[in-house]
Image (cartoon, helix red, strand yellow):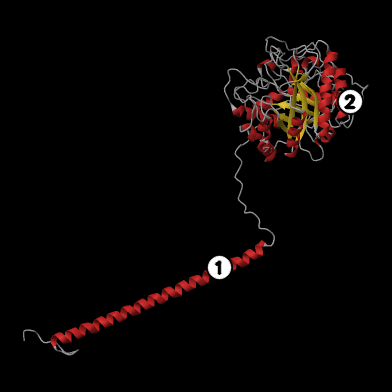
Amino acid sequence: MVLAALVAVIPTLTLSGASTATGEPTSTDGLPTSSDGLPTSSALPATTEPNTTLPPPLFTTAPPTTAAPKPSTTTRATVRTTATTRRSSTTTTTSAAPLPGVGPPTPAAQKLLGPGGGKVAGSGITPPGMKADDVLADLPDMRAHGLNTASVDVFWVADAVNANSVHPGPMTPSDAELERIITTARRAGMRVSLTPKVTCPTCKRTAWRGILTPKDKAKFFDSYGQMIDRYAALAQRNQVWLFFIGSEFNRIQDQANRWRAIASRARQSFSGPIAYEVNWDVWNQVTFWDAVDVVGVSAYFPLSESMHPSVRELMIGWRSSTASKFKAQTWLADLRQLARDTGRPILFGELGYPAYTHTAREPFEPHPKNETPYDEGQAAAFQAALATFEPESWWVGAMWWEWIDTSSYTFRNKPAAAVLQRWYVDGVRPQGEAPINLDPPPKPYTPPPLAAGVSGKFRVLSAFAMLLALLAWSGWLFVTTALVQERKRVRRRLLAGAARYQAAMDVAAGGSTPGEPRHSPTR
């Protein structure tokens, strides 16, 4: 999780015209392309000789042919300029080399995901500052949006930036509570990853673990290793899918052998795959990838300077950033290079965007200043990341930060959540860079099927009911007709009686017999 902005000075790479200086073909965006048709770069990080002294990790199918690149201090060096800066990085460049591209998952990726396992679609369920039950109650909704992996973080504390030990703190759950959280997620049908993390709440500038620089590194790693021992054993007991041995330790990642020892300690208790998560701006500064199975990346890469970025702009930004401080940075090509150098699948252990304007300019900043809420930018960034990386054979998915959170990263009940549902559940893949239509078409109504043996009985009952209705109608018609005829007979009788009565009265009055003419009273 990122807590402060980075100010960097990076040379601008010129990418224009129909081809690059090296004669590479270009895409319709004016970017140089590789043989698979996706934009790449003619300037990629250099590699180092492989480390052949250690056995390959237990989980990968074969040892890598090369090791991770060592950092250089000659080019693209970022500098600290403010008290809130939390990251620094260096990158070297060299000529282009063949890169892994689109296609089915690599053997290592297939083994990580398992038989028939889809790519990781995850999110955290233990965000700092929130009650676990508030998030666990949302697990059915998370599953309904296609999320299949729950990321569990457990925080310990370093008392100072140069502390030589770590220990449980106020935010550290008990082992029983942590096991309950993991069990609840697994019962909801989700894979679980577990990441022990360190925070420094008393540090002046930021609580982020990336600034930690212990005085005595041997003591620090011994204390840190005890924490790893504890949670690796807990992960094994509770069938955790993936265990991270560390995350974003920017200033002590150069202690490669100590990190290898940490990985070895974790494997003594945990039999599943293990990972380390490197921060986005120092992606090429880890040299102990040979000790882990999965390359984790906190993927808060700056992509665009646009206030309201489109999906297309952000997809281009992954290939050549338009963010002012990282102009022309080729993040996609860099990650492809990392996949080739390590031979490991790459998982975005964190990937998120604040739901504000300029969402992809500094996505590592959870509380951007002078910005206004803009949910559509977050949704566009989610779609651009999926469209960019899903075809890559080495990419195994992302842990989206964060389903529910106390910061602007929250995407629950926002368009970004609808994007994930349309992508993961409905299988929508828009043509080109068109934004996903978040209004799914109405589903035609289909009546529920009848239980076995019911349909024949239903037809018999229906016929019997129709017969009864016909008989009732016939009876009603007969009775009605009889009543009408009877009424007519009664009327005729009444009229005849009235006529006879009148005739009798006439005879009595005039003395004439019926049929005889009456005499005039004046005669």
Q: Find numbered disc 1 in the image and state the secondary structure of the residue it sits on.
A: helix
Q: Residue furthest left?
A: 522
Q: Nearer the viewer, residue 100 or 481?
A: 481
Residue 373 image point, x, y percent:
58, 25
Q: Nearer the viewer, residue 43 or 162?
A: 162
Q: Amino acid at mark 2?
A: Thr
- Kindly indicate the quadrant of the structure image that contains residue 78: top right
Q: Nearer the viewer, residue 221 or 85?
A: 221
Residue 47 image point, x, y percent:
85, 19
Q: From this view, report whether residue 218 is shown above or below residue 241.
A: above
Q: Which residue is mark 2?
A: 65
**Which one is closest to the eye, mark 1 or mark 2?**
1
- Kindly indicate the quadrant of the structure image that contains residue 402: top right
Q: Find numbered disc 2 in the image and state the secondary structure of the residue it sits on.
A: loop
Local packing at callout 1 (Cα closer than 10 Å; few below 14, some 14-19, many 20+) is few
Q: Amino acid at mark 1?
A: Met
Image quarter (top left, top right, bottom left or bottom right) of the C terminus: bottom left
Mark 1 to mark 2: distance in Å?
Answer: 80 Å
Q: From this view, report whether residue 232 is shown above or below residue 162.
A: below
Tell me if I can see residue 396 in this picture: no
Q: Which mark is residue 466?
A: 1
Local packing at callout 2 (Cα closer than 10 Å; few below 14, some 14-19, many 20+) is few
Q: From this view, report whether residue 410 is shown above or below residue 10.
A: below
- Kindly indicate the quadrant of the structure image that contains residue 272: top right
Q: Which mark is residue 442?
A: none
Residue 252 image point, x, y percent:
80, 15
Residue 206 image point, x, y percent:
69, 15
Asked if the residue at tag 2 contacts the one at tag 1, i.e. Cβ–Cβ closer than 8 Å, the answer is no
Sequence-wise, the earlier of marks 1 and 2 is: 2
> On the rendered structure, is 225 left or right of 369?
right
